[in-house]
Amino acid sequence: MMSKERVRVGIIGVGSISHAHIQAYKQLPNVELVAACDINAQRAEKVAKQYGIPHVYADYNEMFKEVELDGVSVCTWNNGHAPATIAALKAGVNVLCEKPLALNAQEAQAMVDVAEATGKLLMVGFVRRFGENAQFLKSIIEQGELGKIYYAKTGCIRRCGNPGGWFSDKKRSGGGPLIDLGVHIIDLVWFLMGKPKAVSAVGSTFNYIGSRSHVKGISWYKSADYSEYNDVEDSAVAMVKFDNGAAVFVETSWTQNIKEDRLYLELYGSKAGATLEPELQIMGEKDGYLVDWAPKMDATKSSVQMMFNREIAHFVDCILNGTPCLSPGSDGLEIMKILDAIYKSAEMGKEVAIS
């Protein structure tokens, strides 16, 4: 807990996702955005000018030496998460690190260890936890409305959506749609289920289609450093088992021969089932009848920027008031263990234990 009333914040990595962080910080009267850092100095200068950020750096170590900071958002390529986070923590700065926490569980463990040693906050950007729809569903699950959740299915599959650039360069990203999209949906299911301990995973990855950079007639999100280089999976499927007997099926893709993109999340409980995507709905029984119901909820309450606004506000609240963190680094580590196991299972062709 801090004695002062304002939090001085820096941004490390000013690519596209950083704008969601910056816009959220700008809405908070108790936050002062004081520094922007990016290996691309010109881009850092541009973003700093756009948002009125006074200090600009190309080296975060220099930033930590010269500017007093209470917190940073780490929005770099995935391979920059661990070194930037560890440097910040050792400099006495609290960290909100974008997902995935790291390239792998080994890096994530090192980050968590440094956070514990320094006593600083390490929060991971599991932004979907902060949607009003997810918060509502979490609340009724905790009240026992669904009973025991024994199975879940979730997927984020795209027909043509490889972002290229660093996303499709394994040494910088750690993988393809599994680590990019799968990290969100696996975490959200795990969070809603009460975070049971994962014990094993079996999975497969596929590389038959490629980036589809030649496709005409449509547009899709492309990385700021877009190139056609691609050495990551097109798609992945997996089954994860937990120590309470529950199981989760997950599928992800950037390129897949399907009619349309699909995002779904389904929970199956002993008293009722629920869907969070594509819409929030509860399916159960009442007085001998099958009943489906859903709360009235403005869709904007769970918009992407609204989720970032809540996430950033929570990070600041944790720094100022010592509020328990809703998405601590230790959760990011557990998800990295699951992702590592799925990739290892795909490579080895058999089920892999998770310790």
Image: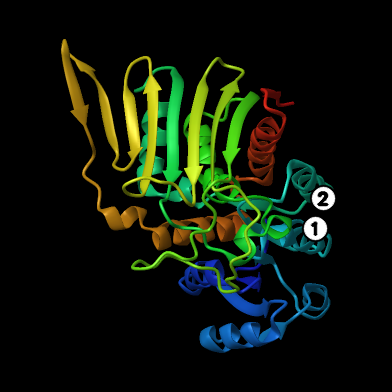
224 and 146: which is toward the camera? 224
Q: Position of residue 5 (x, y in %)?
A: 60, 68
Q: Residue at x 80, y 81 (%)?
A: 66
As drawn, the residue found furthest toward the top would be 288
Mark seen at residue 86: 1
Q: Residue at x 50, y 65 (%)?
A: 213
Quadrant in which residue 218 is drawn? bottom left
Identity, as a three-letter code, of the amino acid under mark 2: Val
- Under circle 1, the secondary element is helix
Q: Residue at x 54, y 66 (%)?
A: 17
Q: Position of residue 91 (x, y in %)?
A: 82, 65
Q: Position of residue 305 (x, y in %)?
A: 42, 63
Q: Residues within 10 Å of mark 2 (few under 14, many from 20)?
A: some
Work out which quarter of the rendered image holds the N terminus and state it: bottom right
Work out which quarter of the rendered image holds the C terminus and state it: top right
Q: Position of residue 195 (x, y in %)?
A: 57, 30
Report if residue 144 is visible in the image: no
| Earlier residue among tags 1 and 2 | 1
Circle 2 residue: 114
Against 270, residue 181 (above or below) is below
